[in-house]
Image (cartoon, coloured by chain):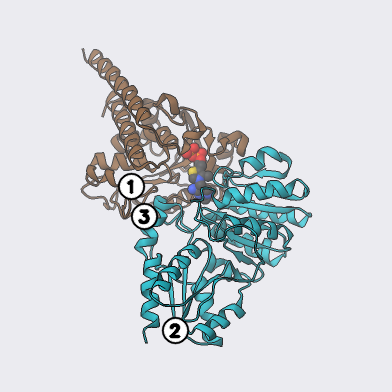
Amino acid sequence: MNTIPNRQVICETLLELAKDDRDIMVLASDSRGSAAMAPFANTYPEQFVEVGIAEQNIVGMSAGLAHSGKKPFVTSPACFLSMRSIEQVKVDVAYSHTNVKLIGISGGVSYGALGMSHHSVQDIAVARAIPGLAIVLPADRHETKKMTEALVNYEGGVYVRIGRNAVEDVYDSADYHFEIGKAVTLKQGSDLTIIATGETVRVALDAAELLAGEGVSCRVLNMHTIKPLDEAAIIAAARETGRIITVEEHSIYGGLGAAVAEVVTQNAPVPMKIIGIPDEPAIAGKTSEVFSHYGITGDNLKAVALELTKK
Amino acid sequence: MDITELKIKAAQIRMDLMTIIHRAKTGHTGGSLSNTDILTALYYEIMKVDPAQPKLADRDRFVASKGHSVESLWCILADKGFFPKEELETYSQFGTRLIGHPNNKVPGIEMNTGALGHGLPISVGMALAAKRDGRPYRVFCLMGDGEQAEGSNWEAAMAGAHYKLDNLTGIIDRNRLQISGSTEEVMGLEPLEDKWAAFGWNVVSIDGNDMEALVNVFREAPAAPGKPTLVMANTVKGKGVSFAENVPAWHHHVPSDEQLALAHSELTAYIGQLQQEGMVAEQ
Ligand SMILES: Cc1ncc(C[n+]2csc(CCOP(=O)(O)OP(=O)(O)O)c2C)c(N)n1
C-alpha cells in the first residue's frame, strides 16, 4: 500500500528539477506544510515565496513573476485557489498568457469533515470555463511525478488538482508515456468504457476487475487532462464500446462527466451515466465514507455498468 | 456570572474541547484554546442570545470568521443548551452536523464560515441592517491575526467605518501564530493597531486571556459613538494547556491519551484554585 501523498511527490520532483533550473519558484499561502513544500522552502529559500493567507495575491504575484521569466508553482488549497482567486486566474494568468502553474492541494472531499468551505468539487467546472487554462488531475504518485516534469516544460497556465492523502497505485512505475491532453487507456474492453480522472481512476479499475468476473469487457480510460480534452479517445470509446460511464470526485455539474457528454452527444451519441457528488454540500466524513455514500466505489460502478449493458 | 465563575466556565470549556478533539482525532486545538476566554465572556456575560429562541429578531450576533476554531464554540453552544450535549460526541464523525467549521444547520450558528476573510464583510452587513432597521442588536466578529492577510478584511474595515457602525465590534485573536509559524515571519502585520485606527476604527488593546478585561471592553456599547470598535485581544495560542502554549504545531495537533489526561489534570487543578480564591473572596 502506497503511503506517499501526491503533494509530497510534487515537492520531491520540483526539488530535483530546481537544481538545474533557477527559474522554478514555489509560492505558498500559509500552506507550505499542507502542500508538503517545507523541504523546498528550506532547500531553495531564494526560489520560495510566502504570501500569507492571501489567495488572490498569490496568483497576481505569480503572474508578475511569470511575466518576468520565472516559472511559478502556486501551492494552495484547491478550494481557495480555484474559487477565491478565480478572477486573477482568468485575467492575470489565462487572458494574459502568463506561465503560472496552479497546484490545488487537498482537493475534492479530502478535507473530510471540514465541510463545504474546504471541499473542492466545483473546481473543474469553474476552470473549464476559462479559455486557455489547462486542467490536470493525476491518478497516482507515478503519474504525479510524470506530470510535474511535463508542467515545467509546458508553456502556459495550468490548474492541477490533487488530494490530501496517499492513494493506491494505478501504475507499476513512472515508466510510461504521459502527455498533457492525451488520455491513457489502462484496460482495453469492448462492452463499455469507464472514464475516470484523478483518484477515481483506481475505483474505475476496481470496477473493471469486478466486471471481468461477470463476463463484461470494460475499457478504462484515465482522463488525466480535462482540458484540452482528448476527444478522439472519447469518440473511439463511444463508437467501439457503445456505452460510457464517467466517475469523478467532483460535482455532477460541469466536470468530467459533463465534458465527456458534450463530446459524446455531438459526435457519437451513446447511453451514458455520470457518477460524482450530487448537487448538495457533501456529507461530512473521511474520503472513503463520502465515496461510498455517493456510490463512487467499484461495487456501485459494477452495478451501474450491469444495468447499462443489460440487453 | 462573576469573573471567577466565568474563568471556571472557560476552563471547563477547554476540557470539553480537548475531549472532542481527542475523540475525533482531528481539530484546531491551538486557536480554539486561545479564543475560549473571548467566547466565554461573550456567551455567558455579554451577548443577548436565547437557546430557546435562537432566531429572536433582536438577538446579538456572533460571527466566527476564524471558523476553524469551532471546537470552543460547539462546546459553548452545547453547554448553553442550543443542542444536546451528547451530540458533541458526533463532532467530525460521518454524517454529523457538528463539522470542523461553523454550520448554520445548528441552532446558535448565524453563518457558515471556514474560508478566512469572510466574517467581517458579513458582520458589516448585519450591523448595517441593524442601523437601517433601527434595531438595538450588536454584532461581534472574531478574526484571526494570520487571517488579516486577506484583503477582504480591509475592504470591510473601510465599509464599517464609512457607515459609522458603532454597533459592530471586531475582535482579533492576536496570538501571533498561524500555521507556518509566527505571523511576523509569514506576513508581517505590525503596526496592526495603527492600521485599524487609520481605517477609522476605535481600537482597544487588551490581554485577551484576561476575563475581567474582556468583560469590561465588551460591556461598553457603543464604545465610541459613530465608530466601529476593534478589540486587539492579545492571547496565547494553546492557552491553558501547558504543552500546547505558543507551539505552532498545536494549530491542528491532536492530543494523545496521555496529553488529554495531563490537560485535564492541569485544568482541574486550575479550577480548584479558582474555587478556593472564590471562597476566600466571599468571606
Ligand atoms: C481563505 C482561506 N485560506 C486558507 C485557509 C486555511 N487555514 C485555516 S486556519 C489557517 C491559519 C489561521 O491563522 P490565524 O488567522 O492566525 O488563526 P489562529 O492562529 O487563531 O488559529 C489557515 C491558513 C482558510 N481556512 N481559508
Q: Is A64 in front, or is A107?
A: A107
Residue A177 visible in the displayed image: yes
Circles 2 and 3 in contact, beta carbons < 8 Å: no
Secondary structure under the numbered disc 2 in the rendered image: loop
Q: Drawn colour of chain A?
A: cyan
Instruction: Identify the disc placed on residue A271.
Output: 2
Pinpoint the chain carrying mark 2.
Answer: A
Q: The brown chain is which one?
A: B
At which x and y percent is residue A257?
A: 49, 74
Amino acid type indicated by mark 3: Ala
Secondary structure under the numbered disc 3 in the rendered image: loop
Pinpoint the chain carrying mark 1.
Answer: B
Q: Distance between the residues labelled 2 and 1?
A: 60 Å
Q: Judge: label 1 CB < 8 Å from ligand 1.
A: no
Amino acid type indicated by mark 2: Pro
- Give the residue at mark 3: A284
Q: In which quarter of the image is residue B71?
A: top left
Q: How far apart are marks 2 and 3 (CA)?
A: 32 Å
Secondary structure under the numbered disc 1 in the rendered image: loop
At which x and y percent is residue B22?
A: 35, 37
Instruction: Please tell me which residue is depicted at 70% across the width and 53% down the height of the picture.
Output: A72
